[in-house]
Amino acid sequence: MSKYKRTHMCGELGLENVGQKVSLTGWVQRTRDLGGLIFIQLRDRAGIVQTVVNKDVTEELFKEAAKVRGEYVLSITGEVAKRAENAINPKMSTGYIEIIVESLEIISKAETPPIYIEDDLNVSESLRLKYRYLDLRRPVMQSIFMTRHKVSKVVRDFMDENGFLEVETPMLTKTTPEGARDYLVPSRVQPGNFFALPQSPQLFKQILMVSGFDKYFQIVKCFRDEDLRADRQPEFTQIDLEMSFVDKEDVMELNERLLQRVFKEVLDVDIKLPIPKMTYKEAMDRYGSDKPDTRFGFELKEIGDIVSTSDFKVFADAISGGGLVKAINAESCSQKLSRKEIDSLGEFVKTYKAKGLAWINLTAEGIKSPIAKFLKEEELNSIIERVGAKTGDIIFIVADKAKVVYDSLGQLRIELAKRLNMIDKNIYNLLWVTEFPLLDFDEEENRYVAMHHPFTSPMDEDIALLDTEPVKVRAKAYDIVLNGYELGGGSIRIHSQELQEKMFGLLGFSKEQAWNKFGFLLEAFKYGTPPHGGLAFGLDRIVMLLTGTDNIKDVVAFPKTQTASCLMTNAPSPADAKQLEELRIKTDLEA
């Protein structure tokens, strides 16, 4: 048994412990030497407690306490005492008591750390990541990982109660063209061949359904070698599940109850069921996004029919070219946005490939707009009526290809809400988005690509369109969205070998290529395949939203930077010559 056995965690002590002798271990948060008294704040993951060393106890104890500095690791034994009234600190959970130290041992000394162990830390992210082990000592960070642990436990308990089996799938698997770029792992025993790290357990969980497991889940690492964004990591964690003999309503209903449980047990927030549903088309038309934030308005309105024959060439040309003209009514913004700020919004939408931002400001003195002179009075009035604008509002308009209009106005409504402080962070608006297109056409590659993945089933009533108008086929797919973030997505899968081969053909694979890449799945489908479907949540993103941080790196213990590097370990790093020789790999690229 360790000689450093503790009786309590630092942050667990309170008035109910007064008079008890306790043994504590932890790190020193700070010290104060008042001459005859030395105060030492001791910290562990449960919190901070104040300890007091009195010179009158023993000279030896006091001398040892005088050596203590910040981040030293100590073992302390003493009696819990009630603080004097004038010394109470209600901001600390342990602020009503203190420990009168009877013995103290310095277990480990510490140099002055390069970052402070405090929540309001004002240092660069790169410094935090380089000294991640110090960053993780901060109470706010440890609280995040306690929440992450709790989410995982709630999920496991819920899945067990609902008859799911947790099954591990391989980390070393076959490289398959599922969307993102694979991380490759060379095989030493089969020179020239490579494993891939899984982008998801997708194929294996479908095969588990063929195997008769009926209900599977896993909290699993996934890997994608792609350009990183602020809310993405090259390795991430999914809550992955699959079910047999279900339709999409069954999968959605189960996951609604799972989310309800998570929110209640982790945040004590009640989620009302059923969660609202919205089709992909409606989401794009109203919000310009397939993951809309519905906590505020600024919805998109179509005005193309009003301006299709307008003298304003930008509008007319967009419509004649098959594009869209859509508008947002920024209510009560006339006095809130200066001309300079309006111009800056024009620059903002250009980052989403919009050529510009038209606007109509309905001021108390009348309409102010650089495009008003190009619009007939009836066109102007019809636009105002269509978007429901009134005096004090500003109408913003983008005309372009559909994707540009949706992207630019979809982001503009979010930017407006942020600038005007309209987003209530205490609201949790969950939404199902359904009926996604099965396919999209990639103009650069001149072929169809899967909107979700190649194993998504088309809606039964649209199957005939696969031969005539594939882009009109809707998928049995569903995404769950929270406040503008995609929490997870899933679909009912194709369980017919013939339909799966047809899907591969539409995606540009010959029969030979399809069998070469996915033959093990197609072969499995020969031997009796149940209808099945599932969903995968992004655990990292769920924890990010539940803990109120806007940085995905905060919820990953040892994250990577934007260049997929670990600043703490300096990974990735070169392999030595012997390793490369064993793998039959020769590198001749310049660094």
Image (spheres, grey):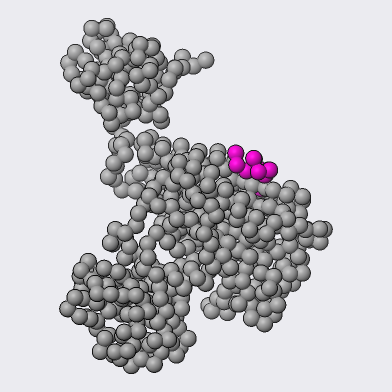
Q: Is residue 262 above or below residue 51?
A: below
Q: Quadrant of residue 376?
A: bottom left
Q: Is residue 289 visible?
A: yes
Q: Position of residue 456 (x, y in %)?
A: 65, 64
> Relative to the observer, which residue lies in front, 424 or 450?
424
Q: Position of residue 334 (x, y in %)?
A: 23, 71
Q: Which residues are magenta?
A: 157-169
Say whether residue 538 is visible: no
Q: Is residue 500 above or below residue 396?
A: above
Query: Residue drawn 78% across and 60% down?
Result: 525
| Residue nearest the viewer, comparing 128 with 413 | 413
Q: Residue at x 22, y 81 (%)?
A: 367
Q: Quadrant of the C terminus?
A: bottom left
Lateral position of residue 344 relative to residue 3, left or right: left
**Residue toward you, 465 or 439:** 465
Residue 583, above or below 525: above
Picture coordinates of residue 316 (x, y %)?
A: 39, 90
| Residue plotted at (36% across, 52% down) | 425
User: Splitting the image into 4 quarters, where does residue 55 fall?
Assistant: top left
Instruction: Return the residue nearer the eye: 105 or 100.
Output: 100
Magenta-colored stretch includes residue 359:
no
Answer above or below: position of 528 versus 265. below
Q: Residue at x 33, y 28 (%)?
A: 93
Magenta segment: does it hold 167? Answer: yes
Is 458 situated left or right of 431 in this image? right
